[in-house]
Image (cartoon, rainbow, N blue to C red):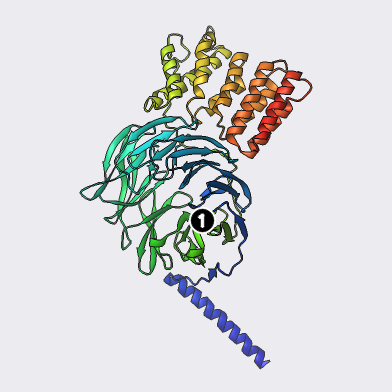
Amino acid sequence: MRQTASILRMQILLIMTLLFAVTASAKTGEHIMPIADLTRQQPSWVAVGAGTAVAPPVETDFGFAVFTDGRMISAFSRTGTRLWQKAVNGKQTPYLTAFGDFLYVITAGRTLNLVNPSGLTLWSVNVGFVVTESPLVGRDGRVFVRGKNALACYGLSGIRKWSIVTGEADTIPLLTFDDGSLLAVSRQTKDGASTGIRVSPFGEVLETLTFTGRIIAASACDAGILISQDDKTIALCNVRDDKAVKAWVINSAARGSSAHICVTHDGTAAAFFSAGGKGTTFSLVSIATGTLLEQAELGDIQLKNLSFLRATTAGFFLADEKHALECKPDGSLIWQAELPKKSTWDFVFYTTRNDLVLCQKDWSLRAFLMRQTVERQMPQGAHVDHPSYLTIGTAKSTIGNLNIERLSAQTLAQMSAGLKRGDYGKSERTWLSNLKREMQSYFMDEASVMRGRRDGGSYFKEHPIYTQSLIQLMAQFGSDCFADEFVTLLTREKDPSLLALTIREAGRQGYDGEGKILAALESVAEHRLSPRDQNALKILCDATFSICRFMGRPALVTKGKAILTYLFLPQFDTATRDYARKTLARLKDLGL
């Protein structure tokens, strides 16, 4: 009994000692955390690529993609299953960017490629200069590419929208302001301070900027662009009254200038990381107010050897050449790990499901699940609401009046020729605005006639050639900005010729980011077209094929096959059924 009581007292003393240690460490900010040794730990999964990675993996809607030295791109699910492996033309570069589940890839130094979610290269174009950083994707699918002294913009169709000569590019990458305009920081300084230009999405140089110090690091967020300068200040820059301004500026609490910036997962705060003491320090700042929220030290991570940094749902992930960790926004550690020798791997990556992935020199990818959570994902192609590049006002009550000034035949011809030719620059702003306005007018005009709110017929129905020109123009912009108009026309248009034209032009556009155009085509096939309308049904087959080929997304390809299979039913004539079968065979031959 005495021995048992003695053991019990020792156990109680041990528990009290541990509790005291934990309490003390919490008060002092020290974190007692076991270090996972990934050289000894078994990976949660292993995959094999097509060569040695030339850049860190890029996150996509389906998981992630890796570009290797064999001119191959390998796509993997979040759990490491290889989805596809396809070659691209031209020597690989480290420059690629995800656009949802698409990839913009730079090859041969100056070739821009658009690769769809099934690995099919939709188009390749020589941009005319050596690209020096990964492409930057705009709000509507357009993409910006930058060289040493040049900046260009391309649409989803591969046609160049504009190209301008700039000052020599700095190492700070191209960034987007809150209004959608671009910041291109120049290597040239003025009195030791960074300079740059603000460029509109339509290629207009809006203003020349001079900062108060040399920019060390920068990161875009919804509220603007966060910067860290060599004068130890950090700031939020945004656009007000069409001018770039600093919303707030504060002195960094760190010992040195912040070399890296990371916005939190919820977008409300940003961490400014600096080298200091034994490792890394960071300051957590409110993006809205510039208020300092937290300050902490992360001992083992060496910023000069930083390999990867990202926000996570719980805080931040950082890795250098020897160590990796995840911490909360207040700096407390969630886990830390010792990495294998750097001589065995090229890149480290951290996924949304908390896998630490090492791109090994032996072509393998080794993943270690560091934290178990319930993963919440947006569905593929889910809509992310961004403000438009245009501000379209509410249509006035005069819309529908026959005396309103419409677009002339000459203007329509100029728009069509310019969109096909490319390099239309700032004209796109006017063209987009005019076409948006006219489509709004069309829908309101039709609604007014249907409700008996005006005498006479619809202007657009009385001038069918004009209306046809508008529908044809929507597909030529190389963006997703007319997706809603296509869906509205497919759903409501009663004129058979205009409905057939809309089907054709929707297919010609190809891009259907949310899948709603293909869903509308399915409804058209089942409810809006007569089985006897052979010509329109063939156009629908072609449009379905074009959208599925462009999108390459498995769910949309499955829907496309279902649309074509529906046309096999006996109520459709032999010619329609045969055309649908041939179209389905063409779709299967793509291997999507």
Residue 29 found in image quarter:
bottom left
Residue at the image point whose x is 39% and y is 52% from the top: 286
127 or 334: nearer the eye?
127
Q: Splitting the image into 4 quarters, where does residue 299 fall?
A: bottom left
Q: Is residue 123 above or below residue 428?
A: below
Q: Quadrant of the N terminus?
A: bottom right
Could you say where residue 527 lies in the image, as x and y percent from the top left?
69, 22
Which of these two is toward me, 110 or 418? 110
- Placement of 217 over or under 137, stated as above or below: below
Identify the image quadrant of residue 398. top left
What kind of residue is marked 1? Phe
For residue 430, side relative to residue 480 (left or right)? left
Is any atom of residue 393 visible in this view? no
Write the residue at 34% across / 34% down. Answer: 164
Q: Name, please, the residue furthest toward the left.
A: 191
| Residue 373 falls left or right of residue 137 | right
Give the secondary structure at mark 1.
strand
Position of the C terminus, as image quadrant, is top right
In this view, the residue in front, 376 or 299, is: 299
Q: Residue furthest bottom?
A: 2
How many other residues sit within 10 Å of disc 1, few (<14), some (14-19) or many (≥20)?
many
- Image location (x, y in percent) of residue 159: 46, 29
When the figure is inspected, residue 13 is found, relative to residue 468, above or below; the finding is below
Query: At which x and y percent is residue 555?
Result: 65, 38
> Is residue 455 in sight in this rendering?
yes
Residue 474, given in percent of the width and then of the height, sits at 50, 23
List the residue tagged with mark 1.
349
465 sits left or right of 564 in the view:
left
Seen from the viewer's position, the closer of residues 467 and 1 is: 467
